[in-house]
Amino acid sequence: MQIHDMNWGQVEEYLKRDDRCVVPLGSTEQHAYLRLTVDKILAERMAVESAEPFGIPVFPVLSYGITPYFTGYPGTVSLRTTTYLAIIRDILDGLRAQGFRRILFINGHGGNSPAGNYAVEWMADNPDTTVRFHNWWNAPKTTAKCKEIDAVGSHASWMENFPWTRLPDSDMPTTAKDMISIPLLVTMAPDAVREYLGDGNFGGLYQRPDEDMLAIWDVAVAETREQLTENW
């Protein structure tokens, strides 16, 4: 259940029987022909579907992340790392103060990885609370399913092209794009990144059949549910 469908009294009653919650993390950045909010959409949907069978509350998604390399593309908004980690700290402090003791961050954006490292540091100061940081898209079973379907894919390619992330009026190329060099990309300033990437796809086909994508999604949901139930 989502927090926006609950009132404070219902949360208080929930905390009498369970101490788990989920916080999705996304970003607002270029995804070639897909929606600018792909990472937000996927993280939030993954959180809701994963938590639903257990009645675990899902907090609103943090829709902005760390993505300075894409700021040459209109619509991309990046937070400084210090700002982002301060927000993560305040979220964790607030959840712990209210009684949540098992917190799962479901992350949809690779640039947010500093939050995972920070969570370990935060737990050292708050040993009564467990925080998990789950990159849903590159978890082992999900990665294996993606590779089974197509070994070539990355940011803004078919791998992120789900029925709920594509735009109805945005026509995509039908040919595959050669993979770019990520080690080279990370040395570039934003304007150079845009010149190098062009449309923003890192490489691979732009779209695969929905049957393939839904098969990946089912594996990812099942794998994420394990984060909510195993060894807590």
Image (cartoon, helix red, strand yellow):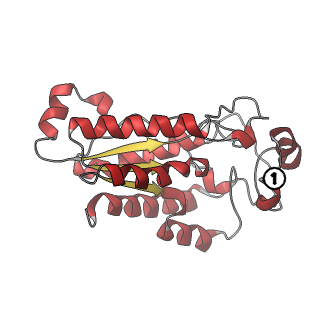
Q: Amino acid at mark 1?
A: Thr
Is 7 on the left-hand or right-hand side of 220?
left
At 54% across and 50% down in the image, what residue appears? 114
**Height in image: 124 above or below 95?**
below
Q: Is residue 224 left or right of residue 167?
A: left
Residue 1 visible here? no
**Foreground residue, 100 or 200?**
100
In the drawing, does residue 147 fall left or right of residue 46?
A: right
* Mark 1 crowd level (few <14, some 14–19, many ≥20, 10 Å Cα): few
x, y percent for residue 27: 58, 39
Q: Residue at x 43, y 43 (%)?
A: 24
> Residue 64, image x and y in percent?
56, 34
Query: In the picture provided, is 118 more to the left or to the right than 181?
Result: left
Residue 118 in view in this figure: yes
Q: Looking at the picture, how far across and down is residue 87, in whole percent? A: 47, 34
Rendering quarter of residue 150: bottom right
Q: Residue at x 10, y 42 (%)?
A: 16
Of the 4 image quadrants, the one containing the C terminus is bottom left
In the image, farthest residue toward the front:
125
In what quadrant of the picture does the N terminus appear? top left
Residue 13 position, x and y percent, is: 12, 36
**The one of 123 and 154 positioned closer to us in this rendering:** 123
Of residues 175 and 89, the one drawn nearer to the viewer in this rendering = 89
Circle 1 residue: 187
Q: Secondary structure at mark 1?
A: loop
